[in-house]
């Protein structure tokens, strides 16, 4: 195909407005004209001609370099690859129209061999939409990805080209999020202060009413209360972007994942703490929880179960407290997977909350599919619950909704996980016990099993943890008595001289105290064999002398 470089003069005739071209009187001057290239491209599918043209080169050498570049791009497609030839021709035609830089030859070769778009104009927003549409995961996971993309990623980096996304762009994005958090906190504080001030203005009086009206108008103009984007949400947005870009690398759209290298604030998970007497006393005084994650002692767990013994869902609270089922697993547990004769149940499904809608789903992870052993007391509780459910079914008659679940609403329909949480919180408040979350009841079950010295692997399998390391983290909230026993057992392993001497002195002191106590129990006499209690002895002697006195 033909191609050439040539000199071009852009001077125009002042009368006609047409380019002078070769008739320009200044054309012979060395720096007057610029250089241009023109390369014939493969014809379109309908047979029409097309070409690549570009001008404005300052030298013939620069123009020739671009012409060689264009020919190298055209040579990427094999002679027996008409589709590849058309793709390269369309790419060059678009580059010519948009006046963009010629694409790199090797990058174009890679894209052509991988079957990708030859022009890297795909934006982050376009790719994320494509990536999300291709995901085949459960609805709750898709909704979380969609929220991250819609709320955090698209508004800040959506218009950037995917192949030009850099670590610095992501650092700027997370910096913007932190700045936005500061603004949200400031706006919330101003709105709260205005509402508090409004509450202090009396209702009566024309002046007060006018002031209240002005304050309300000012509050309406303020931004509404908003939540900040916390560290966990930022980490999740980063994880979503990283997963999407990893797939882009797998498809050979990009070769580098900037989300894998950007650094953001780490998430500090709250430490789980046990409600000791000291912490309970402080909570009663201040109303503040020492940690967002709190665990009851065995005594407190027993007190709660005694308090809710007559609750319709007592069996659920009992099962979570002792066997550690997740909320959704308990709500979705079917009778068909609950074998009370063999003292076991199989966790194979759950109810998950999507917004406020509820849907059935598989367990959270592969390790969530598990068989959970049941103790005799729990089996007895579940049998009583089944009898009560049978009585409810007979009472509701044809209105009964047959779901086959162990725990249901009064009419047999699904339990709503959100309402279960609300009910649990109300029961805890009514019991007067220190507050915990429903998930903390599961955490407490893990702690109780560890306190009972059950093997860590068995505990992990019972809870459905994917790794025993997750279960070991439960030791952060180990019960005080278990911690003390471990400390004493550890201390006894180290023989210390001062420790042996202290124990010897303690035994000697105890022996001396015992001897002194025994000596104190013996009757003690003073001078002349008389008892030391002289007052008592004198009274006894006077009584005896009175009996011996002769009558007159």
Image: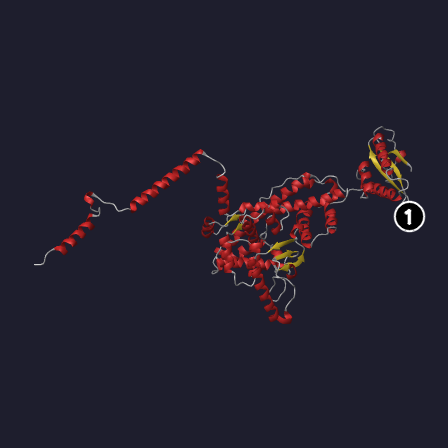
Point out residue 311 in the picture as x, y percentages from the top left corner.
54, 63
Q: Residue 46: x, y in percent?
A: 91, 48
- Asked which quadrant contains residue 219, the reply is bottom right
For the image, the number of numbered tags is 1
Of 39 and 467, the residue lying toward us: 467
Where does the image place residue 542, in percent across and percent down from the top left? 15, 52
According to the picture, the residue beneath numbered tag 1 turns out to be 46
Direction left: furthest residue: 552
User: Where the N terminus falls, by quadrant?
Assistant: top right
Report the residue at 25% width, 45% height from top: 524
Report which quarter residue 410 is drawn in.
bottom right
Q: Residue at x 58, y 63 (%)?
A: 383
Closer to the camera, 294 or 472?
A: 472
Q: Quadrant of the C terminus?
A: bottom left
Q: Position of residue 443 (x, y in %)?
A: 56, 51
- Does residue 159 appear in the picture of this structure? no
Question: Which color scheme does this rendered protein use?
Answer: secondary structure
Quick check: can you spot residue 378? yes
User: Dot 1, how many residues are within 10 Å of its Cα: few (below 14), some (14-19), or many (20+)?
Assistant: few
Q: Is residue 434 left or right of residue 8?
A: left
Q: Secondary structure at mark 1?
A: loop
């Amino acid at each position: 195909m033909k191609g050439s470089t040539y000199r071009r003069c852009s001077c125009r005739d002042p009368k006609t407005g047409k380019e002078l071209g070769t008739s320009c009187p200044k054309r012979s001057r060395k720096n007057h004209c610029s250089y241009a290239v023109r390369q014939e491209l493969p014809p379109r599918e309908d047979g029409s001609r097309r070409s690549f043209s570009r001008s404005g080169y300052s030298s013939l050498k620069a123009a020739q370099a671009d012409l060689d570049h264009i020919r190298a791009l055209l040579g990427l497609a094999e002679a027996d690859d008409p589709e590849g030839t058309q793709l390269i021709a369309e790419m060059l035609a678009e580059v010519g129209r948009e006046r963009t830089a010629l694409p790199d030859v090797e990058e174009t070769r890679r894209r052509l061999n991988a079957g990708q778009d030859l022009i890297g104009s795909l934006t982050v927003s376009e790719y994320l939409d494509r990536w999300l549409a291709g995901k085949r995961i459960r609805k709750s996971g898709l909704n979380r990805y969609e929220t991250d993309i819609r709320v955090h990623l698209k508004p800040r980096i959506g218009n950037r080209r995917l192949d030009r996304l850099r670590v610095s762009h992501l650092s700027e994005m997370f910096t913007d999020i932190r700045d936005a958090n500061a603004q949200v906190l400031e706006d919330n504080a101003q709105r709260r202060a205005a509402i508090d001030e409004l509450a202090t203005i009396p209702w009566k009086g024309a002046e007060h009413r006018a002031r209240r009206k002005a304050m309300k108008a000012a509050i309406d103009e303020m931004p509404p209360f908003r939540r900040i984007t916390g560290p966990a949400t930022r980490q999740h947005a980063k994880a979503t972007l990283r997963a999407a870009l990893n797939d882009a690398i797998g498809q050979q759209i990009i070769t580098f994942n900037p989300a894998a290298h950007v650094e953001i604030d780490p998430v500090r998970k709250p430490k789980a703490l046990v409600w000791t007497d000291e912490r309970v006393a402080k909570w009663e005084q201040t109303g503040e929880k020492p940690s967002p994650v709190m665990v009851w002692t065995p005594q407190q767990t027993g007190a709660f179960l005694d308090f809710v013994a007559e609750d319709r869902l007592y069996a659920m609270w009992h099962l979570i407290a002792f066997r550690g089922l997740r909320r959704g697993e308990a709500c979705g547990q079917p009778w068909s997977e609950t074998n009370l004769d063999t003292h076991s149940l199989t966790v194979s499904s759950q109810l998950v909350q999507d917004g406020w809608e509820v849907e059935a789903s598989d367990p959270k992870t592969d390790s969530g599919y598990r068989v959970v052993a049941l103790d005799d007391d729990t089996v007895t509780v579940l049998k009583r619950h089944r009898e009560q459910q049978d009585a409810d079914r007979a009472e509701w008659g044809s209105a009964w909704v047959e779901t086959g679940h162990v725990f249901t609403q009064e009419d047999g329909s699904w339990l709503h996980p959100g309402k279960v949480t609300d009910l649990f919180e109300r029961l805890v408040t009514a019991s007067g016990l220190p507050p915990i979350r429903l998930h903390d009841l599961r955490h407490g079950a893990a702690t109780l099993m560890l306190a009972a010295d059950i093997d860590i692997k068995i505990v992990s399998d019972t809870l459905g943890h994917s790794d025993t390391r997750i279960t070991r983290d439960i030791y952060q909230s180990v019960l005080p008595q278990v911690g003390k026993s471990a400390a004493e057992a550890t201390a006894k392993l180290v023989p210390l001289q001062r420790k042996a001497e202290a124990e010897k002195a303690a035994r000697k002191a105890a022996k001396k105290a015992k001897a002194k106590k025994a000596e104190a129990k013996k009757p003690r006499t003073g001078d002349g064999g008389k008892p030391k209690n002289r007052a008592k002895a004198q009274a006894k002697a006077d009584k005896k002398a009175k009996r011996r006195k002769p009558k007159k």
